[in-house]
Image (tube, rainbow, N blue to C red):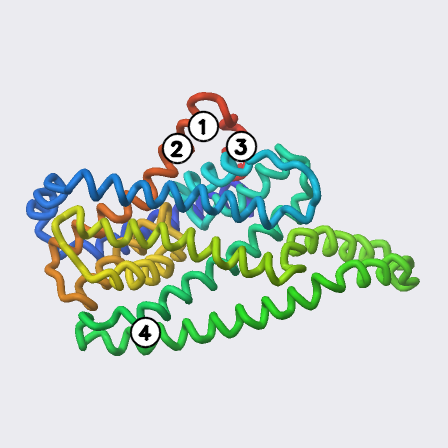
Amino acid sequence: MSKKLKNFLIWGFSIILGILLFYHFAYKANWQEVFNELKKANFYFVTLAVFGEILFILTRVLRWKLLLLPLERKLSSANLLKATVVSFAVSGVAPAKLGEVLRPILFSRWEGVPLTTSAASVILERGLDLIALVSFWFIFILLGTKNVSQDAGVYISMLNKISILIFALSLVAIIFLLWFAKRKNSFEDKARKSEYLLKSPMLGKIVKHFFIFADGLLSFRKKRMIILLVFISLLAWGFVSLTCYFAPRAVGIKLPWGSAFLILSLVSIGASIPTPGGVGGVHKAIYIALVVFYGLGEETAVSVAILGHAMMFLPAIIWGSLYLIFGKIKFQEVSSLNG
């Protein structure tokens, strides 16, 4: 299969899936009422929600820089920011999370960091994100279910099981990384001296790249750094929860504070569906949170979902577009990823 055909199929599937999900999310709504509610959106709360997303991006840049500290070289914060913003912008318009693939590639080009090391730090970020999201879900379960509809019990039970599984796997992964990071140099020395690897150049090359990849995991060598990284991850996703809280407020719906953590948890699931910018998946996630868990009406839920999705994705798309327009990043660098 040619690369162009493969790209066409990926884009085609992603767009069709997004259209189907969006239709399923909104086909019952009275769109005249939806538009009326959106036109009356409170600019103050919209601004607060957008500010939450900007703080989220800046906090992720800080976390990424901390993850790369073991490289013991001066890294440009401006390049970390550009790579992060552009990756979010691409993920906001492209399918299959291409932005996450683009981020380590761009940063490696600009800073001369090995791609495997940069990619390892991004993978580690995803693990930290899971820990933060599961933590917020447990906070919701423990403290935020007071005003939730009784009909939502089945959903809560299912999400509890998923969260416990993710948390357990994350804990095992952290313990392993702690163990491995402290012994990485020892393993690398043994690999260099291994006669078996010397006799097998191909396997030796694979092992060499594995240790380059492992350089991106070395921030897990110290327990204090792990605690700091987890704290920053909680802070970053806490800023997203502000967006989840202020989106309903923008259309005049005041929900309990725990609703922000519920919406955040469901949105993270909806955003994992490979549609351009989470279209359909994120909308449906917010819709379920409002209708199933809090019993809101159809039009209100659709209005909040559309507004919430826009506030979560548009800031990075606009910011990334400005980088392209004013020449901070060459368009060819971004487009070359998709061939």
Q: Report the amino acid beneath label 3.
A: Ala
Badge 2 element: helix
Q: Nearer the viewer, residue 201 or 143?
A: 143
Q: Secondary structure at mark 3?
A: helix
> Could you say whether the residue bearing mark 4 is in a helix, strand or loop?
helix
Q: What amino acid is labelled 4 in the image?
A: Leu
Residue under the image location 60 percent in, 60 percent down: 224
State which tag comes first along the sequence, 3 or 4.
3
Quadrant the C terminus occupies:
top right
> Which mark, residue 78?
3
Query: Which comes before the other along the chain, label 3 or label 1?
Result: 3
Q: Nearer the viewer, mark 3 or mark 1?
A: 3
Cα separation between marks 4 and 2: 37 Å
- Asked which secondary structure carries label 1, the reply is helix
Going from N to C along the chain, the mark reached first, 3 or 2, is 3
Q: Which label's residue is closer to the chain start, 1 or 4?
A: 4
**Which residue shows up at 78% across the image and 53% down it?**
208
Choose mark 3 or mark 2, whichever is in front: 3
Q: Residue at (37%, 64%) from the top-left corner? A: 136
Q: CA distance from mark 1 to mark 4?
A: 42 Å
Residue 282: image location, x then y, percent: 31, 54
- Left or right: residue 331 versus residue 308 is right
Q: Which mark is residue 271?
A: none
